[in-house]
Image (tube, rainbow, N blue to C red):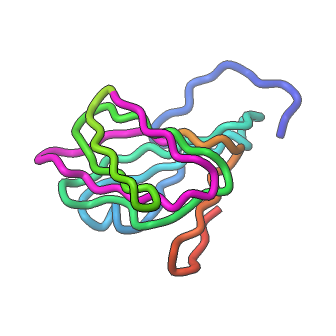
Amino acid sequence: MTDRIEARVVRHSELELLSGKVTSDGGELRQFSGSEYGLVTSAMVAEVAPGSGARRHRHPHAEVFVLHNGQGRFEVEGAYFEAEAGDMVIIPPNAWPSFTNTGTGMLSQVAFHQNARAVTLFEDGARRD
């Protein structure tokens, strides 16, 4: 990390494009790693197709979803939450969440991670960081 944080615009095209279920169904998942800019926060920007979503996974840090368009159903260790554009969903550290786009259009959301780089452990043992 740098000692000095500078104001700047990070273009959508500069965000790391990730692959996985969200992208295989016509959506897109991009990652902003705050560590590259001297920040202690990271984010994932997602466009999720209807019926698609993220499989069960967890992070060693908290995660906050901000829904911009659409609606989704979030499952966090057996508890279910219905959310729509304008809502925020808070996921505690080490919880096992998943979500599905329950609408008819794209679900647009940003997930903020309380870590300089999102660290993800999937239920099948796969890891992304």
Q: Position of residue 75 (x, y in %)?
A: 38, 56
Closest to the observer: 66 or 36? 66
Magenta stretch contains residue 123: no
Is 90 one of the magenta-colored residues? yes
Outermost residue to the bottom:
124
At 35% across and 55% down in the image, what residue appears? Answer: 99
- The image quadrant that residue 8 belongs to is top right
User: Furthest-front residue in view?
Assistant: 79
Q: Which residues are magenta?
A: 87-111
Name the residue rendered at 43%, 65% in the picture: 19
Query: Nearest the camera: 19 or 79?
Result: 79
Q: Residue at x 59, y 62 (%)?
A: 120
Residue at 32% of width from left, 47% of height from top?
A: 47
For the residue pair 38 and 50, the one nearer the viewer reads as 50
- The answer to whether residue 63 is above or below residue 98 is above
Task: Say whether residue 65 is left or right of residue 16.
Answer: left
Nearer the observer, 20 or 57: 57
Q: Residue furthest left?
A: 104
Question: Which picture quadrant has residue 83?
Answer: top left
- In the image, taking residue 34 as reference, residue 11 lies left or right, namely left
Residue 97: image x %, image y %?
46, 58
Quadrant for residue 78, please give it. bottom left
Residue 5 in the image: x percent, y percent?
77, 24
Q: Quadrant of the N terminus?
A: top right
Q: Position of residue 114 (x, y in %)?
A: 66, 41
Locate the C terminus and report the quarter of the image it occupies.
bottom right
Note whether 17 is above or below 42 in the view shown.
below
Horizontal arrangement in the rendering, residue 33 relative to residue 47 (left or right): right
Is 99 on the left or on the right of 7, as rendered? left
| Name of the residue lying farthest toward the top | 7
